Image (tube, rainbow, N blue to C red):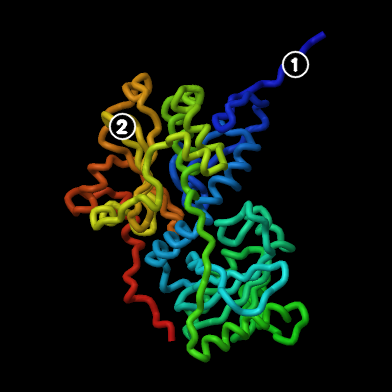
Amino acid sequence: MAVHMTKQKYCIYCSEDKPIDSFSREHIWPDSLGGDYLDSFWQTDSVCRTCNSTAGVFVDAKFIKSFFVASERWNGEYIYIDPNSPSSTSVPLAYIGHPLGGPKIEGEVPELYLGPCGTQILHVRPKYDETWFGYVSGDPRKQSKQKWAGKVYITLNTTNPFWAETTFESARRRFKKSDIFITNGITQTANGKTYAYALDREAVEHSSHTSYIEWMENESLRGESFHFQPEISLNFEIRFLAKLALAVGCQLFDDGFGLSDSGVFLRKCFREANYEKQKSYGLKGTGYLGAKSTDFDKFLAWPGGWKLMVINSAAGLALSVRTPNGKCMTIPITNEKKYTQTLDKSYENGLIWIAIPALKLGIGPIELADYIAHKQGHLVQEALAEAEKYIVDESSFPPCA
């Protein structure tokens, strides 16, 4: 009698052997931060579907949806707005937090965002448990389901059609499953499809929300300042950095790196959700809040881009992530010589990749010295020069009024 053996494969995230058909493509650098556009080095087929999903929700999303990363995205992507095409333009919305005060909305949470020209965008969503503290907009799994997506109320702060259209498009892309209403404008349609409705303040379905909107409007009329409470998790990046370092090590040295001392340690840090236990492991590196942002740091940053660098030095192999605003997070990958001595010389100089979400563009690898020479104007890198063509002078934007 023939015995059919199911082919097995090793998952670098959980270190278990699983059937080969239970694996899926993993974006090591998240696709929502431009990972789709980086070269194949930043994608792997060595992660099982379960780990891929779990890491996406509890590790990647905690980083992407943190208050700080939301702020980075808001500040970095405006320079790529196309002033001639508002319908194809969207920008990340600035997450402000929960307004303090106002009427209570039972079982729901109001969260305020700012859009172009200071437009107020109120997202009223279901209240989730403490698991999702620190996630902008709460549980990312439920945001894809319309019954959990909540409602969005836009109070325009501009009369310019360009900025109004950009605001609606940004809200539509940010809150894909939510019903969107305008508190001080008319119903908006595009290509025969309605994507923002004029708010009917008498409608029963909006009664609790309308009272909240009117409270905010009255406060503004009286010239009162709003106070907000953003949800901030102080350890939002640690597991994410450990996951990146583990995956990069496996890309450089094959999946067997995951079974090395360095790989086992990084996996332990990546999979540990308890912050106190995580701290006791002694993971080295620099997190977001510990990162400096000097003039030189800002010089090394790429406008609206996430700069990833792998560098091999006497201290060992390390990964750095530089944000659009210049903050530099770092994490060691390994100092085991059986690995570091096998890398080619280009890693000693530092190899960088840049993900620019607004342009749907990935650049690299480029040696760090060549990147700096380009930034200083000494040596042109064609890929970088091409990206610079899309940077818009903000003085060319139409006025808000």
Q: Residue placed at 66% from the left, 21% from the top?
A: 7
Percent of width and height locating residue 248: 44, 34
For residue 76, side relative to residue 54 (left or right): left
Q: Nearer the viewer, residue 372 or 247?
A: 247
Percent of width and height locating residue 136: 56, 60
Q: Which residue is mark 1?
A: 4
Q: Tell how many labels.
A: 2
Percent of width and height locating residue 125: 66, 66
Above-or-below relation of 299 to 230: above
Between marks 2 and 1 in the image, the one whose residue lies nearer the viewer: 2
Asked whether the viewer can see residue 90, the reply is no
Above-or-below relation of 85 to 304: below
Above-or-below relation of 231 to 322: below
Q: Nearer the viewer, residue 93 or 213?
A: 213
Identify the image quadrant of the N terminus: top right
Where disc 2 sits, the SS reads: strand
**Amino acid, disc 1:** His
Q: Quadrant of residue 208?
A: bottom right
Q: Residue placed at 47% from the left, 34% from the top?
A: 281
**Amino acid, disc 2:** Asn
Where disc 1 sits, the SS reads: loop
For residue 385, side relative to residue 42 (left or right): left
The local crowd at label 1, few if under 14, some if 14 to 19, many if 20 or more residues have their Cα within 10 Å, is few
- Give the CA distance from mark 2 to mark 1: 45 Å
Q: Residue placed at 51% from the left, 91% from the top?
A: 222
Label of residue 322 in the image: none
Q: Which residue is mark 2?
A: 312
Name of the residue lying farthest toward the bottom: 222
Identify the image quadrant of the C terminus: bottom left
Q: Nearer the viewer, residue 205 or 293?
A: 293
Asked whether the viewer can see residue 13, the reply is yes
